[in-house]
Amino acid sequence: MDFISKFLEDADKLGNRRRLRSMVPVSARECILDGKKCIDFSSNNYLALADHPKLKEEAVRWTNLYGVGSRASRLVTGTFPPYLELEKKIAAWKGSEAALIVGSGFLANLGAVSALADRGTSIFADKLNHASLNSGAQLSGADFKRYLHLDYRHLEEFIGKETSPRRIIVSDTVFSMDGDLADVEQLGKIAGKNDAILYLDDAHATGIFGVRGEGLSSGAGGMTISMGTFSKALGSYGAYLACSEEIKEYFINRCSTFIFSTALQPATYGAIDAAVDLVQTSEYIEIRKALLMKSANLAREIRGLGFETGATASPIIPVLVGDSDKALRISQKLLDKGILAVAIRPPTVPKDSARLRISLNAAHNDEDISKLLEALSLNI
Ligand SMILES: Cc1ncc(COP(=O)(O)O)c(C=O)c1O
């Protein structure tokens, strides 16, 4: 068992050791971390829906109707009728023919990508894609090629030389640690030209982009498969695959993480149902607009302090620091001032690109933002 202690020692030496901390949420703005109250700039609860009364009410209502567990995989026990209705609602929202709910974003990517690819497939993936997409590619045994981040010339160079019969382009639409956006229209064109499947991960776009919060994937046109989560802006848990009816049928028969895993519990379906309705209302169209404007302003102010924030265009604002220890130190100093801004270090991000990942949500007010800027200004 020596490898375990060696791994942990090495992680300590490099400043990359992770530890679990106690966190009690107070509201979308605040939490108590290891006993200390702070403003929370680290959650993905962008629309502040995680404690929304309507989501809680629906979670309780669905629990009272169907119990606390779904009893087995949907293929084993059958599917409760409202689950199918909810999938139709999600498909209409996404503008796809069909949708399938899967346990989590990680499970959806792992199962769907590995179902779509086999050993004779080539997968072309953005270098900064989420780990779950890479895990799906690796599980499939496909030839896995990673193009430089957002460098579509590099992608075209790779795919132009390709001879394998099945090709899949895989990309996040909003990159989770950088907050920048893929050019989905361009990806759609490259996929079309090269007879490739396009698989987009809309996890951080769902609820935030699109007129009705449907995300960015529909901008790609054509035969796109998109995955999105209910665990971030939509406040609860779980994920969807939006695709054609035929591909949905294929996933029901081939996606191992759907087939061999218990369905989400009814409470989660209830919360998802409420969130999908809410994000399409005019109230949330305004909330989305305001959040994006507030995020752009904050990124500009942070750059004004002398930090780099990359090319973010979303509520995810990376404050780039480089060195892991330095990122941890700044994060700790912010915490001492009552501000939670988590240090993200390798291997989650590339070597020497440790950062504070600030994520803004609809509930943060001007005072919260001023406190964050003041604390950052002391740490340049
Ligand atoms: C881009 C992206 N895809 C997928 C996931 C996984 O989603 P979930 O947390 O629902 O498993 C995440 C979550 O961190 C993500 O950032």
Image (spheres, rainbow, N blue to C red):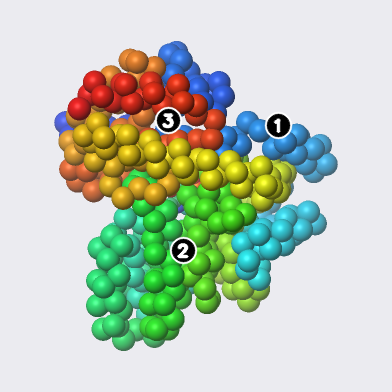
What amino acid is found at the position of numbered circle 1 in the picture?
Answer: Pro
Is the residue marked by circle 3 packed among few (<14), some (14-19), or many (20+) residues within 10 Å? Answer: many
Which SS class for mark 2? strand
The answer to whether residue 76 is visible is no
Is the residue marked by circle 2 packed among few (<14), some (14-19), or many (20+) residues within 10 Å? Answer: many
Q: In the rendered view, would you say 241 is above or below 6? A: below
Which SS class for mark 3? loop
- The residue lying toward the viewer, choosing from 57 and 293, is 293
Q: Nearer the viewer, mark 3 or mark 2?
A: 3
Residue drawn 75% across the image and 39% down it = 58
Q: In the rendered view, would you say 149 is above or below 106? A: below
Is the CB of mark 2 within 8 Å of ligand 1? no
Q: Quadrant of residue 235?
A: top right
Q: Quadrant of residue 244?
A: bottom right
Which residue reaches farthest right?
65
Rounded to the nearest angstrom, the CA distance separating label 3 from label 2 is 26 Å
Picture coordinates of residue 86, whole percent (x, y): 72, 55
Residue drawn 24% across the image and 71% down it = 154
Residues at circles 3 and 2 in contact by the CB criterion of under 8 Å: no
Disc 1 target residue: 53
Disc 2 target residue: 200
Which SS class for mark 1? helix
Picture coordinates of residue 22, whole percent (x, y): 45, 21
Disc 3 target residue: 41
What amino acid is found at the position of numbered circle 2 in the picture?
Answer: Leu
Question: If the image is split into quadrants, where does the C terminus sit?
Answer: top left
